[in-house]
Amino acid sequence: MEKLKSFVRQNLKLILFVLFGLLVVTGILVIVLGGGQSDGFLKVLFVIFGIVLELLACSVAFLTIVMGESEPANFFLYDGKKGANISLDELDFARIDKKMTFIMTNLAESATDVWSRRVIFTQNSDILRENEAMVPLVAYKILYDLAERANDNAWQAYLSADALVIEDISAALELNGDAELSNAFKFLFENSAGSYERTAKFLTDNKKYIQSKMLKYVKANIEKF
């Protein structure tokens, strides 16, 4: 049933177009053949029925035009191959992660760049200034990418990060009410003592947590993207 619903949603305009064609053709046939070969009251019924079918066809045509004025492309839901937004139920973390990777390439030059300069609360970030709803997602993405890194350079950059960068990430997490992750992240950084092992274990153990927070946040705020 879900597959059928999904198929209908994705092909609704095509279905309406086919329905429009069938109604037009059927209406003409009813009027020409049915009405033309009948007499009296029966002929009137065929003609009326044919007109009703043509009016229905006009209604379907109007609906198709309205459907043509589709909803604006949503950053997280828009599928380039389909040329339309997917349903919110189809949205998963993999899609969000891919979209956020695109955002990060526009915010930072490399994986280490996010630790050497402030990319979140800065006037130089046009992307985040235009869409403040992205801010918590950037913070989650930074931590998620760090957990995914086998590259020691990213972790060394984390250890040498400016305290303001850490404060920015923590503040961004708290915009989503995630004080728990924010406080834990700050505590681990402030007590790292030149080693990233504890932070690495913490983030690795909490990758699914970060994924779930990002997915829930996007779904809860989807209209902002």
Image (spheres, helix red, strand yellow):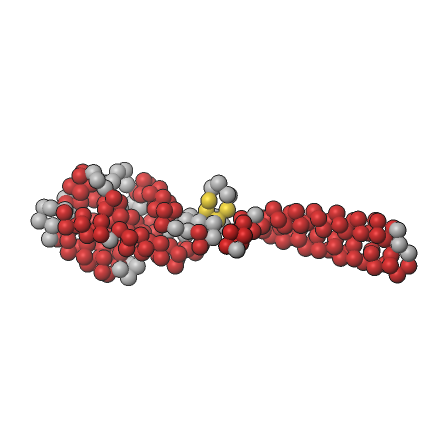
Work out whether residue 21 can be spotted: yes
Residue drawn where x is 18% and y is 38% of the image: 153
Give the vertical position of 108 relative to 131 (above or below): above
Q: Position of residue 156 (x, y in %)?
A: 15, 41
Question: Which quadrant of the view contains residue 161?
Answer: top left
Residue drawn where x is 74% and y is 55% of the image: 53
Q: Position of residue 38 (x, y in %)?
A: 89, 54
Residue sitting at the far right:
39
Q: Position of residue 166 (x, y in %)?
A: 19, 51
Q: Is residue 8 left or right of residue 119?
A: right
Question: Which quadrant of the view contains residue 160?
Answer: top left
User: Camera-side residue: 224 or 182?
Assistant: 182
Q: Position of residue 12 (x, y in %)?
A: 58, 50
Q: Is residue 224 left or right of residue 63?
A: left
| Numbered label tally | 0
User: Camera-side residue: 193 or 42?
Assistant: 42
Q: Is residue 9 left or right of residue 74?
A: right
